Image (spheres, rainbow, N blue to C red):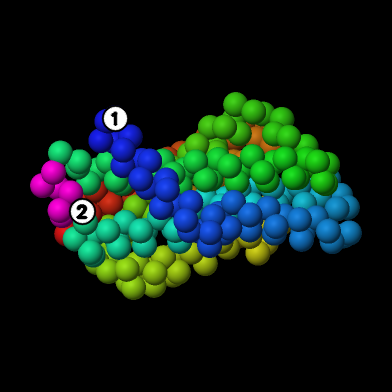
Amino acid sequence: MSTGTAVLKAEARLFTREPGALFWILAFPTLLLVVIGCIPAFREPSADLGGLRTVDLYVPIAILLAMITSAIQSMPPVLTGYRERGILRRMATTPMKPGALINAQIALHGAAVVGSTLIALAVGRLAFGVALPRQLAGYLVALVLAALSALAIGAAVSAVSRTTKITQAVGSAVFFPAMFTSGVWLPVGAMPELLQDIVGLTPLGASAQALDQAAAGQWPSWTHLAVTAVWTVALVAVARRRFTWE
């Protein structure tokens, strides 16, 4: 068994022993969707939303919420905790390099997001008749970029935070604005046009609009995709520059 596979299996066992993290990533976003869908007014088409229903807009929001929770609230404390306890430093002196552990964490949290995405799409379709994405290729492109941008935010939080307590504080400071820009409190499509333009300059705001467009059958705006990609590259650069093993 390769060292990377061994680390992945070990981290997977530890990850499954964290029911709190699994709940907030896998279950909570869909539960929020169910709550929204159970409100009769949110199941009625709205002219302000282009004939869509509020519950239609909350499927991509639930997906983005899973990404935010996984990448910003769950992953950074794990990585910072390993560094704070000297685990990464000790691993650096062995054939099992610290990068394998980081890759394992990214893979596990990415897999959790994929699972949450499938659950949200299935519940939205079966319980509330939400149409599946009409522009599947565009939706997948927007989804991958959104996940990469969220993971890049989490990596940057891990890189600039020296301790777990600082990570939790910085993560919380980033988490709530990320929830707003992704449309958790108010769908981006329901925001005033000026606010949509402002939110569209953020990685998750641009991702939300790209996913909405793909779900409606359009190819996502290249502007939204470019904004998400530029943020991803910039945040990865910050993470690579600031991250230390000890």
Which of these two is toward me, 75 or 45?
75
Q: Which mark is residue 212?
A: none
Against 137, residue 211 (above or below) is below
Badge 1 element: loop
> Where on the picture, by quarter, is residue 37?
bottom right
Query: For the residue marked with disc 1, what is the amino acid?
Result: Met
Place of residue 203 in the rendered image (x, y in percent of width and height, measured from the top left)? 48, 50
> Where on the picture, by quarter, is residue 89?
bottom left
Which of these two is toward me, 141 or 127?
127
Quarter of the image with the C terminus is bottom left
Quarter of the image with the N terminus is top left
In the displayed orientation, state which residue is furthest to the top: 137
In the figure, is residue 102 to the left or right of 136? Answer: left
Task: Name the residue that disc number 2 marks.
Answer: 88
The span picked out in magenta is 89-94
Q: Is residue 150 visible?
A: no
Q: Which mark is residue 1?
A: 1
Against 169, residue 17 (above or below) is above
Label 2: how many Cα within 10 Å (few below 14, some 14–19, many 20+): many
Q: Is residue 86 visible?
A: yes
In the figure, is residue 197 to the left or right of 53? Answer: left
